[in-house]
């Protein structure tokens, strides 16, 4: 059974085309900028079977066009890897495109995770900081397993969209962006790189949950700094479709 937090019927940002998005419960990270802290706890979600998700998603199938499908986001979908793999295998049997939006925590190379990747058309992979210590300050955990997962997905040829949240004073310094770019240049499966500007739209959830928000006073990045970060991160990247 999948522990579901919520769904979105017409997502247009989390994978190709128009998508049915399933947000799962549970996340091992504690990102200082998280806009979904209400997904952190593994319990309190609704329990859905694979059939529940597929049946709900297929109501919107006529809107998907040739690219759309189902995206599983979170929280962290890899915490429920076996159920998500089962969902994606059924989706593939029905010709439905599949994406996960993940921070690759916990990645350990298990057979269940391999099964999940084998049934995933695109991985939206969040790399929050290239420096492990600063990643830990930002999210509570180092980035070793995330980078290992990125390398592995490159080795097995699963297409990825890299995502990097730009938080002024935390993730936007030029030297870190250049290090991240150097890492990305070693991967062979990148379809797209997105810089996501930090925002405070989830702040009310922190207040509602009685959580201390560590980024008080941090303003969203300027359009110019987002453009600059994009330029650095995309420099020298050869996208997978250009290699074919
Ligand atoms: S990985 Fe996503 S859901 Fe988890 S804490 Fe970070 S931003 Fe929130």
Image: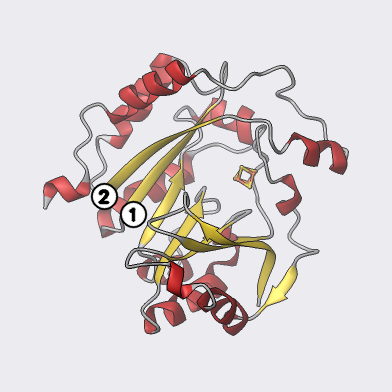
Left or right: where does residue 167 sit relative to residue 191? Answer: right
The x and y percentages for residue 75 are: 63, 53
Question: Dividing the picture into quarters, in which one does residue 182 lie?
Answer: top left
Question: Dividing the picture into quarters, in which one does residue 74 lie?
Answer: bottom right
Q: What element carries label 2?
A: loop
- Residue lying at the far front in this picture: please name it: 62
Left or right: where does residue 180 sit relative to residue 58? Answer: left
Density class for disc 2 (Cα within 10 Å; few <14, some 14-19, many ≥20) is many
Q: How many labels does the image show?
A: 2
Q: Quadrant of the N terminus?
A: bottom right
The x and y percentages for residue 239 are: 22, 43
Q: Residue 31 bears which disc, if any?
A: none
Name the residue that disc number 2 marks: 189
The x and y percentages for residue 116 are: 44, 68
Of circles 2 and 1, the one toward us is 2
Which of these two is toward me, 217 or 130?
217
Left or right: where does residue 205 sit relative to residue 140? Answer: right
Q: Which residue is drawn at 54% across and 79% down?
A: 54
Q: What element carries label 1?
A: helix
Q: Residue at x 79, y 37 (%)?
A: 204
Q: Is mark 2 within 8 Å of ligand 1?
A: no
Q: Residue at x 28, y 46 (%)?
A: 190
> Is 61 above or below relative to 237?
below
Is disc 2 in contact with disc 1, using a CB cutoff of under 8 Å? yes
Ligand 1, seen in the image, is in the quarter at top right
Density class for disc 1 (Cα within 10 Å; few <14, some 14-19, many ≥20) is many
Name the residue that disc number 1 marks: 153
Question: Dividing the picture into quarters, in which one does residue 163 lie?
Answer: top left
């Amino acid at each position: 059974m999948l522990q579901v937090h919520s769904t979105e019927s017409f997502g247009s940002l989390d994978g190709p085309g128009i998508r049915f998005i399933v947000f799962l419960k549970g996340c091992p990270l504690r990102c200082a900028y998280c806009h979904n802290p209400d997904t952190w706890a593994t319990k309190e979600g609704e329990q859905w079977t694979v059939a529940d998700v597929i049946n709900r998603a297929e109501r919107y199938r006529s809107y998907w066009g040739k690219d759309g499908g189902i995206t599983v986001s979170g929280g962290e979908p890899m915490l429920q890897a076996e159920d998500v793999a089962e969902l994606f295998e059924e989706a593939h049997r029905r010709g439905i495109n599949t994406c996960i939006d993940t921070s690759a925590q916990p990645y350990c190379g298990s057979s269940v995770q391999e099964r999940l990747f084998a049934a995933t058309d695109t991985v939206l992979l969040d790399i929050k900081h290239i420096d492990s210590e600063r990643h830990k300050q930002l999210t509570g955990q180092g980035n070793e397993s995330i980078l290992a997962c990125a390398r592995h997905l490159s080795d097995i040829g699963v297409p990825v969209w890299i995502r990097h949240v730009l938080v002024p004073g935390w993730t936007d310094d030029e030297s870190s962006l250049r290090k991240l770019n150097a890492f990305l240049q070693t991967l062979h499966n990148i379809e797209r790189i997105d810089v996501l500007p930090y925002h405070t739209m989830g702040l009310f959830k922190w207040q509602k949950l009685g959580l201390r928000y560590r980024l008080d006073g941090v303003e969203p990045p300027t359009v110019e700094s987002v453009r600059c970060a994009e330029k650095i991160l995309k420099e020298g990247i050869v996208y997978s479709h250009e290699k074919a």
